[in-house]
Amino acid sequence: MAELEFWVDGMTCAHCERAVTAELAAVDGVADVRVDVASGRVQVTHDAPLSRTAVERAIDDAGYELRSWSADLGG
């Protein structure tokens, strides 16, 4: 298992947390998602390589914007 950390703009409440968590959990390879609304920090544990495009799309589909990455995912 590996962990990826990134920051998302626009989250303000528990609904935001649930939306981001649900969209990211549906991405192939994602095993766990932890969201801190106050800081915008999202931690994803994954057991397969993640596509940067898939992660960005999931965040966009939830209605939010990816701000920055802890590491380059490629793809």
Image (tube, grey):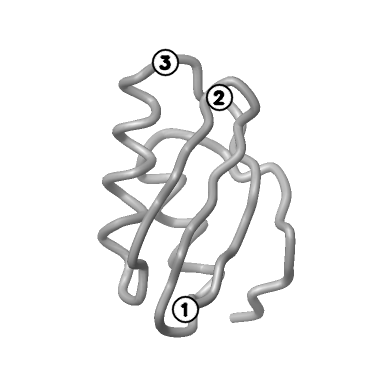
Q: Which residue is mark 3?
A: 13
Amino acid type shown at disc 3: Cys
Q: Which residue is mark 1?
A: 1
Mark in the foreground, 3 or 1: 1
Q: Is residue 4 above or below residue 8?
A: below
Q: Is residue 12 above or below residue 44?
A: above
Q: Looking at the rendering, in which quadrant would you find the C terminus?
A: bottom right
Amino acid type shown at disc 2: Gly
Observer-nearest of 65 and 33: 33
- 38 vs 31, left or right, is right
| Mark 1: secondary structure | loop
Q: CA distance from mark 3 to mark 1?
A: 29 Å
**Residue in the image at 50% along x and 76% along y:** 51
- 28 vs 65, left or right, is left
Earlier sequence position, callout 3 versus callout 1: 1
Residue 49 x %, y %: 48, 83
Residue 72 x %, y %: 72, 71
Q: Which residue is mark 2?
A: 10
Quarter assignment of residue 47: bottom left
Earlier sequence position, callout 1 versus callout 2: 1
Amino acid type shown at disc 1: Met
Q: CA distance from mark 2 to mark 3?
A: 10 Å
**Residue in the image at 41% along x and 15% along y:** 13
Quarter assignment of residue 5: bottom right
Residue 56 x %, y %: 51, 57
Q: Residues within 10 Å of mark 1 (few under 14, many from 20)?
A: few
Observer-nearest of 63 and 37: 37
| Mark 2: secondary structure | loop
Q: CA distance from mark 1 to mark 2?
A: 28 Å
Observer-nearest of 2 and 24: 2
Q: Are marks 2 and 3 in contact (CB under 8 Å)?
A: no
